[in-house]
Image (tube, rainbow, N blue to C red):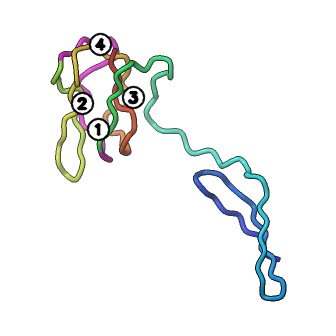
Amino acid sequence: MKNYTITVNGNVYDVCVEEADGAVSTSAAAPKAAPKAAPKAAPKAAAGAAGSVKISAPMPGKVLKVNTSAGAAVKKGDVLLVFEAMKMENDITAPQDGTIASVNVSVGQSFEPGELLVSLN
C-alpha cells in the first residue's frame, strides 16, 4: 500500500493505493484544508465596496499607471489605468459614465485574466 498526497483545484487529498493480485484499488480520504497562499502585496477593496459595473482584466499583465481613484467621476472612454502585456502598453477605459466604486490594483501589481481591476457605479 502506498500513500500519496494529491492537490486538485486547491483541495488536498490523502490517497492510498493498494495493489492486490494485479488489480489496483484506491481509496481517498476527505480533503484536507489547503495551505494558505501568501497574501498579495496590494490591498484589496472591501467586498461590499465593489460597484455594479465590473471591469476585469482581459489578459495577464502588470499595472504601469492608475489614473483614477475611488469616488472619482468618469466619462465613457476615459483611461482608468495603463498596463503592460506582451511588452506593449494597453489602456483600460471606462465602458460608460459613472463614479469609481473601487480600484482593486496598484502600480507594479501583476494580475491574471478575469481578475477585477476597477468597478463603477
Residue beneath label 2, please?
81
Distance between the Cα atoms at labels 1 and 3?
11 Å
* Residue at left offset 63%, top offset 58%: 7
Residue sitting nearer the eye, 110 or 77? 77
Q: Callout 2: few (<14), some (14-19), or many (20+) C-alpha neighbours within 10 Å?
A: many
Q: Are marks 4 and 2 in contact (CB under 8 Å)?
A: no
Residue 92, how many percent across, how many down? 23, 32
Q: Are marks 2 and 1 in contact (CB under 8 Å)?
A: yes
The relative height of residue 98 versus residue 89 in the rendered view (above or below) is above
Q: Amino acid at mark 4?
A: Thr
Residue beneath label 3, please?
104
Residue sitting nearer the eye, 102 or 25? 25
Asked which quadrant contains residue 100, the reply is: top left
Label 1 element class: strand
Numbered disc total: 4
Q: Is residue 84 left or right of residue 26?
A: left
Mark identifier at residue 63: 1
Range shown magenta: 59-75
Residue beneath label 4, please?
99
Quadrant containing the N terminus is: bottom right
Mark 3 or 2, nearer chain start = 2
Q: Is residue 2 magenta?
A: no
Q: Amino acid at mark 1?
A: Val
Mark 1 or 3, nearer chain start = 1
* Residue at left offset 57%, top offset 45%: 37
